[in-house]
Image (spheres, coloured by chain):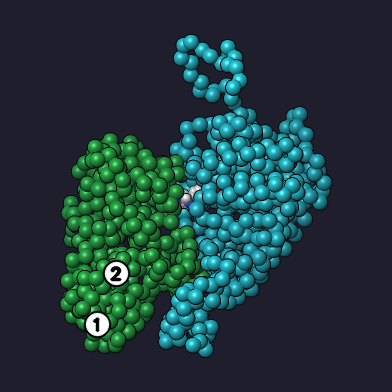
Chain colours: A cyan, B green
């Protein structure tokens, strides 16, 4: 045991409230597209910067179109990333494309950046026969093995300790890869969050914890979520490095994540990033925020729109102009609409997918249950129009 | 009598409980000023203040642990879990703590004041994490009571019964019926007994048994069967744990046939427990095997929800098969 230093001991009760640990916010880019004084832009080439911006615009267009589709009754449910595009795309852009992403549900921008196609998005949203998830999960629960994007799970925070485990495996595999897990400030209240950080610190795991602090968990404002100054100070309790970043500043998010990745992969130091941002849209298509927050507050954040901020920077760099913006918006709108129409018409997943993937193979008793369903459908084909054809010709 | 939907009836019950006893508290994710994502706790914070109705941080194990502590102290917590699918982080607090508090302390301490409300069940295009019926997990836990109402009248009376019952009680609300089920609800305080099933329709050829949203499905199936001349007796179990063996056995002794239905998967579902007990009690009187009409042994699907659900046609077919056995 280490010898106790005299300064470690006091002879009257002295409490520590942690007030000396003030965590600053890292910012680079102002809303007008200029850098803060003394700030240095990250080393981003034009192609990469435009790939990032393109993903942001795509995400915005997709979200607008699909919310409208939900309102028209084409889609059962939708969730927008609106306002948080910089946080999810800036961080993803700073990773190796082979790094694993384990997200919550509002991170479609990350997937767009990795190259998930409009068609792939649509197939999941409509749960059709080409959906990788076989129509089993609600809209926005995407997943892609080839893009290293773990399939979304609705129960909050469950992916956070899984990310620690996944990254520990990556460390053992020695391929120099890491995992990022992205989650809300509300989900960070779950026990799973705390378990994940502690285990990551104890086992020195190459994992990045990216908290999107967007101010709300459905109707619950962050002041009712935690008494502390955000989520960031929790890192100290686990002896983990932490940075707070302006989540609407894509350059700062990129730079913070790039450095965090270096620490994770080179030094096996897990890192917590708290991205300060705002959920500009409703929680989901089922929510109406007017019951719990003001239009003024929303406007304040709309003025900090991360898309406009990056666009202003790109324009100042001479990499982007109004015409290109107009063209991109138009072509994306067209593409999203056209792809949606096709995906919506694709048939539902096959009836047999009711029982597959529960295990690696269908147990005999479950196969019998499927047969019973089929023979029932044969009796009442009109009641189950989507499956009537497939139920034909059974035993 | 005023007409209400199930949410209004639940809100009314909570309002009455809070007015009646200042020890009653309502809390959970988004239940404060917003009134819960389904609005079951609307206006309670406005009426009873932030110290008695409030948002909690987003942590189910915390919510129920906190509620256990409150109940041990003598308060009467009514904790909301936003969806029954999200009750599992609190499984330890419920199964190892709520259920065993009294037993392990030799009745020095108890958490009898605790009520846990959670919307459950499918039919709302919710997929595998917004559709589950987890009653059987908790029915396997002595020390808990598990209650499921079928309509607004029952919801109000059973919830008031649960809040006032001196045992920790899980109250699963059929969310598909929250707004769809509308009916007359008596004004003021009334408490329906826990542990008692209700015969909602008498008949002589076959007994149909279910709870919660499945009662509506049974109703449709029975209508079809009666047109075929089959006289059906219908029982709403209402309390899954401890369940009313006597009333069910008495009915099956009379009819000789039993169909039990629930949305949860077949294997390990509560219908299995009922079937085992009833065949012990009624073996020589049974005219046909006890039938179970349930979900499949899979997670709850989305695109194929219709095919999965134990709907009225599947229940009707089970009635026919049982009668023609
Ligand atoms: C374990 C669990 N509890 C509750 C929910 C219901 N729920 C879904 S999203 C949400 C709020 C999440 O807020 P936050 O983590 O801040 O993410 P944001 O929606 O702001 O992106 C809640 C309570 C859930 N999905 N899982
Ligand atoms: Mg949030």
Q: In this view, does B249 lie above or below A183?
A: below
Q: Is residue A51 above or below residue A37?
A: below
Q: Position of residue A33 (x, y in %)?
A: 73, 40
Q: Mark 1 lies on which chain?
A: B
The residue under the point 46% across, 11% down is A12
| Residue B276: image tag | 2
Q: Can residue A191 be seen in this view?
A: yes
Nearer to us in this view, A123 or A309: A123
Q: Which chain carries label 2?
A: B
Q: Is mark 2 on a helix, strand or loop?
A: helix
Nearer to us in this view, A252 or A72: A252
Q: Where is residue A259 in the image (x, y as percent from the top left)?
A: 73, 38
Nearer to us in this view, B281 or B121: B281
Q: How far apart are marks 2 and 1 (CA)?
A: 16 Å
Dot 1 crowding, Cα within 10 Å, few <14, some 14–19, many 20+? some
Give left or right: position of B157 versus A230: left
The residue under the point 31% across, 38% down is B70
Q: Position of residue A90 (x, y in %)?
A: 70, 46
Q: Position of residue B282 (x, y in %)?
A: 21, 74
**Comes first in the chain, label 2 or label 1:** 2
Give left or right: position of B49 versus A354: left
Q: Can residue B36 be seen in this view?
A: no
Nearer to us in this view, A246 or A393: A393
- Look at the image and tell me in which quarter the N terminus of chain A lies: top right
Q: Is residue A264 above or below residue B160?
A: above
The residue under the point 22% across, 58% down is B195
Give left or right: position of A290 versus A345: left
| Residue A174: image tag | none
| Residue B287: image tag | 1
Give left or right: position of B246 versus A93: left
Q: What element carries label 1?
A: loop
């Amino acid at each position: 045991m280490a010898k106790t230093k005299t300064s470690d001991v006091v002879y009257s009760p002295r409490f520590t409230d942690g007030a000396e640990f003030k965590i600053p916010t890292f910012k680079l880019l102002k809303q007008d597209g200029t850098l803060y004084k003394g700030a240095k832009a990250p080393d981003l080439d034009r192609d990469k910067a435009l790939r990032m911006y393109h993903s942001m615009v795509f995400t915005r267009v997709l979200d607008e179109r699909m919310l409208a589709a939900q309102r028209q009754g084409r889609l059962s449910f939708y969730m927008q990333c609106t306002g948080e595009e910089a946080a999810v795309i800036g961080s993803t852009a700073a990773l190796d494309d082979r790094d694993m992403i384990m997200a919550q549900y509002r991170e479609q921008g990350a997937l767009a950046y990795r190259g998930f196609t409009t068609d792939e998005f649509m197939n999941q949203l409509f749960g059709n026969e080409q959906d990788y998830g076989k129509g089993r999960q609600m809209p926005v629960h995407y997943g892609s093995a080839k893009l290293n994007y773990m399939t979304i799970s609705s129960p909050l925070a469950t992916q956070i300790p899984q990310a620690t485990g996944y990254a520990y495996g990556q460390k053992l595999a020695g391929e120099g890869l890491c995992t990022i897990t992205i989650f809300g400030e509300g989900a960070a209240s779950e026990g799973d969050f705390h378990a994940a950080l502690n285990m990551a610190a104890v086992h020195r795991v190459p994992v990045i914890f990216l908290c999107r602090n967007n101010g709300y968990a459905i109707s619950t404002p962050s002041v009712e979520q935690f008494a502390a100054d955000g989520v960031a100070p929790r890192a100290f309790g686990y002896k983990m490095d932490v940075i707070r970043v302006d989540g609407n500043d894509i350059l700062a998010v990129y730079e913070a994540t790039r450095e965090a990745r270096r620490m994770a992969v080179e030094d096996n130091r897990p890192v917590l990033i708290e991205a300060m941002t705002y959920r500009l849209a409703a929680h989901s298509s089922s929510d109406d925020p007017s019951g719990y927050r003001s239009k003024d507050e929303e406007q304040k954040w709309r003025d900090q729109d991360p898309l406009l901020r990056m666009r202003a920077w790109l324009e100042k760099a001479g990499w982007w102009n109004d015409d290109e913006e107009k063209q991109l918006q138009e072509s994306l709108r067209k593409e999203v609409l056209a792809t949606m129409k096709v995906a919506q018409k694709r048939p539902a997943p096959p009836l047999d997918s009711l029982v597959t993937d529960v295990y690696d193979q269908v147990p005999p008793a479950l196969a019998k249950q499927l047969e019973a369903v089929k023979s029932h459908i044969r009796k009442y084909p009109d009641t189950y129009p989507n499956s009537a054809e497939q139920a034909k010709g059974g035993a | 009598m005023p007409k209400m939907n199930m949410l209004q009836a639940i809100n009314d019950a909570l309002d009455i409980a809070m007015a009646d006893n200042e020890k009653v508290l309502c809390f959970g994710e988004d239940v404060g000023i917003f009134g819960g994502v389904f609005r079951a706790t609307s206006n309670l914070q406005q009426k009873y203040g932030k110290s008695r109705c409030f948002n909690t941080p987003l942590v189910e194990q915390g919510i129920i642990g906190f509620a256990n502590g409150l109940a041990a102290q003598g308060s009467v917590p009514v904790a909301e879990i936003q969806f029954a699918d999200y009750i599992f982080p609190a499984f330890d607090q419920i199964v190892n703590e709520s259920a065993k508090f009294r037993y392990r302390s030799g009745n020095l301490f108890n958490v009898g004041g605790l009520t846990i409300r959670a919307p459950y069940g499918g039919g709302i295009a919710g997929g595998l994490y917004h559709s589950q019926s987890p009653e059987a997990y908790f029915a396997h836990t002595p020390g808990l009571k598990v209650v499921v109402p079928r309509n607004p009248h029952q919801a109000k009376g059973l919830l008031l019964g649960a809040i006032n019952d001196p045992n920790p009680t899980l109250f699963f609300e059929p969310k598909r019926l929250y707004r769809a089920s509308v009916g007359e609800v008596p004004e003021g305080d009334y408490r329906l007994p826990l542990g008692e099933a209700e015969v909602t329709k008498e008949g002589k050829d076959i007994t149909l048994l279910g709870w919660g949203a499945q009662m509506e499905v049974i109703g449709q199936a029975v209508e079809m069967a009666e047109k075929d001349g089959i006289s059906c007796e219908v029982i709403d179990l209402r309390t899954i744990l401890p369940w009313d063996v006597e009333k069910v056995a008495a009915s099956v002794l009379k009819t000789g046939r039993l169909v039990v239905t629930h949305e949860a998967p077949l294997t390990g579902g509560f219908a299995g427990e009922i079937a085992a007990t009833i065949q012990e009690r009624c073996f020589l009187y049974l005219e046909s095997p006890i039938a179970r009409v349930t979900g499949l042994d899979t997670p709850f699907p989305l695109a194929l929800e219709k095919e999965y659900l134990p709907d009225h046609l599947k229940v009707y077919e089970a009635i026919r098969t049982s009668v023609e056995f």
